[in-house]
Amino acid sequence: MRLIDGELRVAHDAWELAEAPTLEEAYLDPLAELVSSNGKQLHPGDDGDFQLLIDIKSDGPQTWAAIEEELAEHRRFVTRYHHGQAKDRAVEAVISGNRPLAEMQAAQTRYSFYDGRSTDLRSGADPEFMPLVSENWTKLFSWQGVGQLPAAEREALHDYVETAHAAGYRVRFWATNDIAGSARENLWSELQAAGVDHINTDDLPGLKEFLTR
């Protein structure tokens, strides 16, 4: 997410900006069409949580302020935090990338939440501020799906997830092997078995096939 001339553009790299959709076009407007009239469900009968991860690539405080303005316009279905309490709605926006920690902590009202890192796992942070902990897989683990996951790494993975869940945090890893094939499926299977909440991939059809097989 980049703030360009006052517009929030969904682009990972600068070269993508010319054809990049806005935050409204890519996510908020489509979600508005799906959500129930009371703003609490994306699909009829489904009370599951939906986290919208917004990865800030430009200036953190300035971009976050613009994101907050747009999320506030969709308060009907966006979870908000107001004076110590979260009001749950269908979509929980989580800020990653250039996260403006001080500004987010100081806000009395906000429509987004903080994406932590492995160093925050035992911080005691309130999950109503930090509902998600994300980390570069290669920072903690060497295995990329070839052969068996080493026993020590499997134990470390399960301990990591259990510690996060006990504190009320969801878990996500990025930089996992995303090349289609048996190694990726082995890795995804281990993530699933450990209870990792979000599997990171650019291959959504491939992940759908894996999860629904």
Image: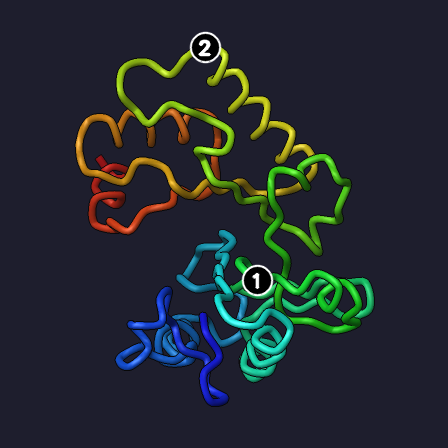
Q: Which residue is mark 1?
A: 98
Question: For mark 1, does the 10 Å Cα neighbourhood hold few (<14), some (14 to 19), or many (20 or more) residues?
Answer: some
Label 2 secondary element: helix
The three-letter code of the residue at mark 1 reads: Asn
The quarter of the image holding the C terminus is top left
Residue at the image position 74 percent from the left and 73 percent from the top: 109
- Residue nearest the viewer, comparing 180 with 92: 180
**Position of residue 195 measured from the top left corner of the image (x, y, whole percent):** 48, 31
Instruction: Name the image quarter holding residue 22.
Output: bottom left
**Position of residue 128 measured from the top left corner of the image (x, y, whole percent):** 70, 54
> Is residue 3 placed above or below 171 in the rendered structure?
below
User: In the drawing, does residue 46 fall left or right of residue 83?
Assistant: left
Marks 2 and 1, how far apart in space?
34 Å
Residue at the image position 40 percent from the left and 30 percent from the top: 192
Q: Are marks 2 and 1 in contact (CB under 8 Å)?
A: no
Q: Which residue is mark 2?
A: 151
Query: Nearer the N terminus, badge 2 or badge 1?
Result: 1
Residue at the image position 33 percent from the left and 77 percent from the top: 17
- Residue nearest the viewer, comparing 104 with 195: 104
**Position of residue 93 measured from the top left corner of the image (x, y, whole percent):** 55, 64
Q: Residue furthest left?
A: 181
Question: For mark 2, does the 10 Å Cα neighbourhood hold few (<14), some (14 to 19), or many (20 or more) residues?
Answer: few
> Is residue 148 placed above or below 130 in the rendered structure?
above
